[in-house]
Amino acid sequence: MNPVAWTLYGLITSQFGDVQVRLDTGETVEEFLRSYFGYRHEFLGVVAAIIVALPALFAFIFTMAIRFFHYEKR
């Protein structure tokens, strides 16, 4: 679960995932992203949910760690 990888997935897919322009190889930009990187434009909603969920998960873990670990206990 690499947040940078999910962010790049979302940025590239949202900007280029539905482009139907043909490249020099004869395939469209959408087909290239799908075949070379495995990026699918239909998966964009899931990517957005993961990008929102990761910071929330880290905030929850931080809150629980501060609450239950008593560092100043003697």
Image (cartoon, rainbow, N blue to C red):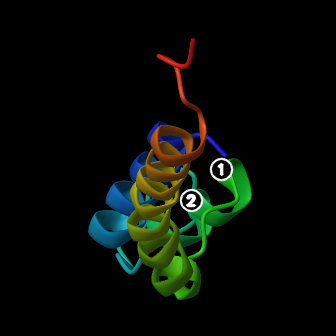
The three-letter amino acid code for the residue at tag 2 is Leu
| Local crowd size for mark 1, using a 10 Å CA cut-off: few (<14), some (14–19), many (≥20) | few
Total residue callouts = 2
In the displayed orientation, state which residue is furthest to the top.
74
Question: Where does label 1 land, which residue?
Answer: 37
Q: Is residue 40 left or right of residue 4?
A: right
Q: Is residue 31 left or right of residue 23?
A: right
Q: Could you say which is closer to the camera, residue 31 or residue 62?
A: 62
**Element type at mark 2:** helix
Quadrant where the C terminus is found in the figure: top right
In the displayed orientation, state which residue is furthest to the left.
15
Question: Where does label 2 land, which residue?
Answer: 33
Which x, y percent locates residue 33?
A: 56, 59
**Element type at mark 1:** helix
Identify the residue at image location x=33%, y=71%: 14
Q: Are marks 2 and 1 in contact (CB under 8 Å)?
A: yes
The three-letter amino acid code for the residue at tag 1 is Phe
| Local crowd size for mark 2, using a 10 Å CA cut-off: few (<14), some (14–19), many (≥20) | some
C-alpha separation, residue under disc 2 versus residue under disc 1:
5 Å
Q: Is residue 24 left or right of residue 11?
A: right
Which x, y percent locates residue 44?
A: 47, 79
